[in-house]
Image (spheres, rainbow, N blue to C red):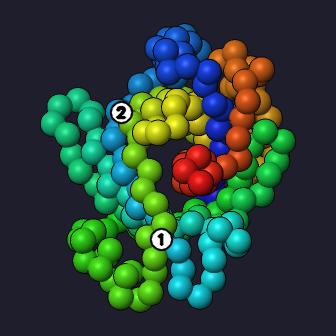
Amino acid sequence: MRETESKIILRSCREINELSKRLEDIGFKLVEEVYEEDHYYNHPCRDFKRTDEALRIRLSIIRHQGMPRTKYTLTYKGPKKIIGRSKTREEVIAGIDDPEQLHHLLEKLGFNKVGIVRKTRTYYKRDTIVVSLDRVEGLGCFAEIEIERGAEKSEKILDKIVHELGLNNYVSTYKSYLELILEKNK
């Protein structure tokens, strides 16, 4: 699978409420609220920072119409390709049943934990477009707009959504939350 996304840095976390209303006004539906905790690892034989790859174990606590449920996934992300204001990259996701054993297995294989990203996300969806409004611990708030399609068509669709949300003049970033946290903590 390929993901194409645009990540917008919000000026203030107070903007999340305004964006929620705008999303609903333009036909997006609230899907769920999720707490995510991402544990990132570096490969023992190649530096993922240099190769622009990522490997993470994600804990998701999903709140949707009732009791929260917990889900764990292992995700590999390939190198980014920059297209306008967005990025596209390969993404491989697998569900996991025993995250503690997987952490232990990765450490035994020589993988090193490089960081943890904690965030609360509110997901909205319209057709094949997903917007998440993110509150990232230690960083601030962001809007991520993601679509799964051909990269060139996706760029035009993403630009249209950015415009509809009134975010054209906001700063966007190609960096992952992990990259931003590591830069901030240098």
The answer to which quarter of the image holds residue 126 is top right
How far, Cα to Cα, is label 2 from label 1? 27 Å
Mark 2 lies on a secondary structure that is strand
Q: Mark 1: few, some, or many residues within 10 Å (few <14, many ≥20)?
A: many
Labelled disc at residue 84 = none
Residue sitting at x 36%, y 51%: 37
The residue wearing badge 2 is 32
Quadrant where the C terminus lies? bottom right
**Foreground of the two, 178 or 86:** 178
The furthest residue to the front: 186
- Is residue 145 visible from the viewing direction of this image? no
User: Which three-letter amino acid code belongs to the residue tagged 1?
Assistant: Tyr
**Foreground of the two, 15 or 75:** 15
Residue sitting at x 20%, y 40%: 68
Mark 1 lies on a secondary structure that is strand
Residue 51, given in percent of the width and then of the height, sits at 70, 72
Quadrant where the N terminus lies? bottom right
**Foreground of the two, 51 or 90:** 51
The furthest residue to the left: 67
**Foreground of the two, 181 or 91:** 181
In terms of sequence position, does the residue under pointer 2 or pointer 1 come before the other?
A: 2
